[in-house]
Amino acid sequence: MERDLFEEEHELFRETVREFLAREVVPHHGRWEKDGIVPREVWKKAGEVGMFGFGVPEEFGGSGIKDFRYNAVIVEEIIRVGASGLGFSLHNDVMAPYFVDLTNDGQKARWLPGFASGELITAVAMTEPGAGSDLQGVRTTAVRDGDHYVVNGSKTFITNGINSDLVVVVAKTDPSAGARGISLLVVERGMEGFTRGRNLEKIGMHAQDTAELFFENVRVPAANLLGDQEGQGFFQLMANLPQERLSIAVAAVAAAETVLAATIDYCRNRQAFGRSIGGFQNTRFVLAELDTEVEIARHYVDKCIRALNAGTFTVVDAAKAKWWATELQTRVIDRCLQLHGGYGYMMEYPVARAWLDSRVQTIYGGTTEIMKEIIGRSFGF
Ligand SMILES: Cc1cc2nc3c(=O)[nH]c(=O)nc-3n(C[C@H](O)[C@H](O)[C@H](O)COP(=O)(O)OP(=O)(O)OC[C@H]3O[C@@H](n4cnc5c(N)ncnc54)[C@H](O)[C@@H]3O)c2cc1C
């Protein structure tokens, strides 16, 4: 069925993104995978072609356009070339709402121009060694001391952890107040007591810097609190997580489509028993099942994008999109790898990388199990 989500302006923008990726990313990504990180200059170059700052008001260097279809274009094109090291979707899809919607005028002036130009790279630090799914279990504290908060604690698995300049840190400002005792503070590169730990060695996404962060008596100005009062952090996170989950679902469907298309091609050309492997009924049935499922997922996710733009997208819609699309992605890629035979196990084949890169999709942004909890709770049992 025809995909009718995008208008001409989105497709024009897609060309820009494609051209940028072909020129500035694809030729270098293999080296970045060895380095474990993407150089910061790439962020600046992406900023120059307008890949950041959708939703950032024009006066602060953004496009002023809030339309998640542009975000989706960027995600899809990055996925199609397998550039899993670029932390752009975290910056654009996850962090933009924090920096655009939760900031006051002074904060906007300080942070948004760099956000839109790619000179300030962002991250969000929720997860700790002892608390992931259970966000209320975070132990990092922020204690008010005059015009500052004194932050202590540690975080782990932080995307853009090494490259980030602005880290939204989830901390307890009132440990006795449960969900109402959590606040979001922007910790900036160079603040005394803020250090980065290891760039973590992962099974996939080798060019993505995922790191531990440590905070030891970091004096963060009270002016870096997001929102107009303390204790709003948990609710701010809950409000923004649906968009993060939709971004992950968009990536999931794009990855499944990309691998499926490559696999259909492979099955056309690979010979066994004197015929192409696509000639076996089993191959055709597997591909038929996957093609059907991916197309159905595509239409649900596109509908979610429209709902997000319209302001009607719910936490439950997002949970459905996230768990379904990512579980489908891992299943599709695994079955496509099988159809590649031994070549599927070789890193030079995109399906092998996709298999490794995709595994995390059902885990970060909220696990499949937590997504089902969210949906299950909506029945009100
Ligand atoms: C590559 C990567 C990048 C990441 N980037 C970021 C980032 O930028 N910022 C950030 O803050 N975090 C990030 N994370 C962390 C990620 O969000 C967490 O790993 C995830 O939320 C799961 O938390 P956990 O690892 O502590 O697992 P746990 O919460 O310990 O869960 C372990 C298992 O128990 C299950 N489980 C837990 N609670 C329940 C329940 N109530 N019911 C049923 N099952 C349950 C889980 O589903 C899972 O299967 C990243 C992780 C990875 C791997």
Image (cartoon, rainbow, N blue to C red):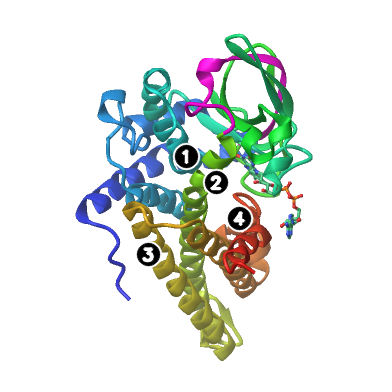
The answer to whether the residue bearing label 3 lies less than 8 angstroms from the nearest atom of ligand 1 is: no
Of residues 157 and 230, which is closer to you in this image? 230
Query: Of the numbered discs in the image, which one, if any, rests on residue 361?
Result: 4
- Image quarter where the C terminus lies is bottom right
Identify the mark nearer the N-term, 4 or 3. 3
* Residue extent of the magenta highlight: 209-231
Q: Residue furthest top?
A: 146
**Which secondary structure lies at badge 2?**
helix
**Which secondary structure lies at badge 1?**
helix
Whole-angstrom CA distance, mark 1 to mark 3, is 23 Å
- Residue occupying image coordinates x 71% and y 47%: 134
Identify the mark nearer the N-term, 1 or 3. 1
Q: Which residue is mark 1?
A: 88
In this image, 199 relative to 29: left or right?
A: right
Q: Nearer the viewer, mark 4 or mark 3?
A: 3
Q: Which residue is mark 2?
A: 238
Q: Nearer the viewer, mark 1 or mark 3?
A: 3
Badge 4: how crowded within 10 Å, few (<14), some, or many (20+)? many
